[in-house]
Image (spheres, rainbow, N blue to C red):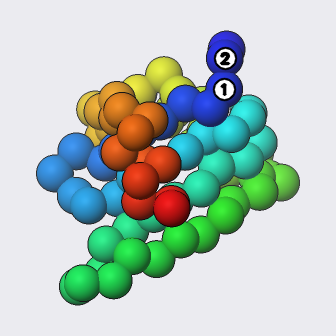
Amino acid sequence: MIFPVYRKYKGLDVWFKITDDKNFIEIKRVGRNLMKSEIHAKQFPELLLIMDMIKMEGGRWEPCESTVVEALLA
């Protein structure tokens, strides 16, 4: 897998930048504001979440262009 990988929740203003198999950045729109969280997976459920995002399992995620996420982070 080549990182970073970019994903978005379908139908929601939540974007993800997956930096490696144990870390990702989540950006959420709350009203007019953006909230950024850095997640460092330490437990098995968190690691499964990252694998699901990468593989787009469960139909919750869609691919996202890197330019969109990087603009939100800037």
Please rate how many residues cluster around mark 2, counting C-alpha atoms within 10 Å: few if below 14, some from 14 to 19, many from 20.
few
Is the residue 55 above or below the residue 38 in the image?
above
Q: Residue at x 24, y 84 (%)?
A: 32
Figure quadrant of the N terminus: top right
Viewer can see residue 45: no
Q: Position of residue 66 (x, y in %)?
A: 44, 35
Residue type at mark 2: give it: Ile
Q: Residue at x 62, y 32 (%)?
A: 4
Separation of disc 1 and disc 2 at Cα?
4 Å
**Res 65 label:** none
Q: Locate residue 71 relative to residue 47 in the image: left or right.
A: left
**Which residue is labeled 2 in the image?**
2
Q: Residue furthest right?
A: 42
Q: Secondary structure at mark 2?
A: loop
**Res 3 label:** 1
Q: Position of residue 62 (x, y in %)?
A: 30, 33
Residue type at mark 1: give it: Phe
Viewer can see residue 36: yes
Q: Residue at x 68, y 60 (%)?
A: 39
Q: Position of residue 58 (x, y in %)?
A: 34, 32
Q: Give 45 or 15, whichever is nearer the viewer.
A: 15
Instruction: Find out whether the residues at labels 1 and 2 contact each other: C-beta distance under 8 Å.
Output: yes
Q: State which quadrant residue 65 falls in.
A: top left
Q: Residue at x 48, y 22 (%)?
A: 55
Q: Secondary structure at mark 1?
A: loop
Q: Position of residue 10 (x, y in %)?
A: 22, 45
Q: Locate residue 37 relative to residue 74 in the image: left or right.
A: right
